[in-house]
Image (cartoon, rainbow, N blue to C red):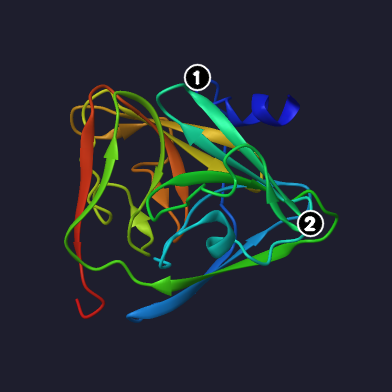
Amino acid sequence: MKNKTLLLTAVLGAASLATAVAQTVYSVNAVGYVNVTVPAGKFALLTNPLNQPTNSLTAVLPDVPANTLVYAYNPSSSSFSTFTKRSTGWTGTGATTATLNPGQGFFIKNAGTTDFTITFVGEVPQGTDLTVNYVAGFNLIGSIVPQAGKLETDLKFPAATNDKAYIFSTATQGYTTFTRRASSWTGGTGEPTLDVAGAMFYQAGAAGAWKRTFSVNQ
């Protein structure tokens, strides 16, 4: 219950000062990898930045330590599905069919006493119609391509006036709330940013689509 309360803080509208997200190291080719460190005892808010053949929970996170927790958000019910890594594999309702697709945000909790590193491996999403759909209300989403940068300027998110972005800090375990105004963002230090493999809670006034055109050659 304590864990779910923390994860739903953004949904309830609370926010706190944030600094950096999990340390990220990456290499991008047609096939690449992304390393993300999750500190001991902490949550990180991530998205899978690379395509696997199935993007199943097992395929995307095959080697995380036992007792690691993953929380996948359902915007239709504003609730989380919880999956736990055991020595025999992932458990939890729907774990065998759960997927973590590029652009789909999820929380991961390092339940251990030492940091661990996730190595995402797979194919870089490329093409002219890469799309992350979002609903009116709260969404847990990230960039569908492995890029870091400012949400609108670099990552081409179609933010609308009065929408809110909740950026989670792994360091502080809290959120900074950014509000899109007519000509700028307020609430943080300018336009919100995402790291490679980083995700956010996004509160949209209307449903929409985050579309990208991306090639490793650009």
Is the N terminus in the top left, top right, bottom left or bottom right quadrant?
A: top right
Q: Position of residue 206 (x, y in %)?
A: 23, 24
Secondary structure beneath label 1: loop
Horizontal and vertical percent for residue 81?
58, 34
Measuring 54% from the left and 64% from the top, which residue is drawn there? 59
On the picture, is 179 further left or further right than 205? right
Q: Residue furthest left?
A: 128
The residue that label 1 is drawn on is 13
Instruction: Kindly report which numbered mark, 2 or 1, lies closer to the viewer in this rendering.
Output: 2
Count the marks: 2
Sequence-first disc among 2 and 1: 1
Q: Quadrant of residue 159?
A: top left
Question: Tag 2: residue type?
Answer: Ala
Residue at (27, 23) in percent of width and height: 162
**Mark 1 neighbour class, 10 Å CA radius: few under 14, some 14 to 19, many 20 or more:** few
Q: Compared to 84, does 163 lie above or below?
A: above
Task: Work out which quarter of the rendered image holds the C terminus and state it.
Answer: bottom left
Where is residue 13? Give x, y as percent.
50, 19
Q: Is residue 87 above or below residue 73?
A: below
Amino acid of disc 1: Gly
The reply to whether the C-beta atoms of the residues labelled 2 and 1 are less than 8 Å apart is no
Residue extending furthest right?
113
Q: Nearer the viewer, residue 119 or 52?
A: 52
In this image, 46 relative to 3: left or right? Answer: left
Q: Residues within 10 Å of mark 2 (few under 14, many from 20)?
A: some
Q: Is residue 29 left or right of residue 158?
A: right
Q: Is any part of residue 4 visible from this angle?
A: yes
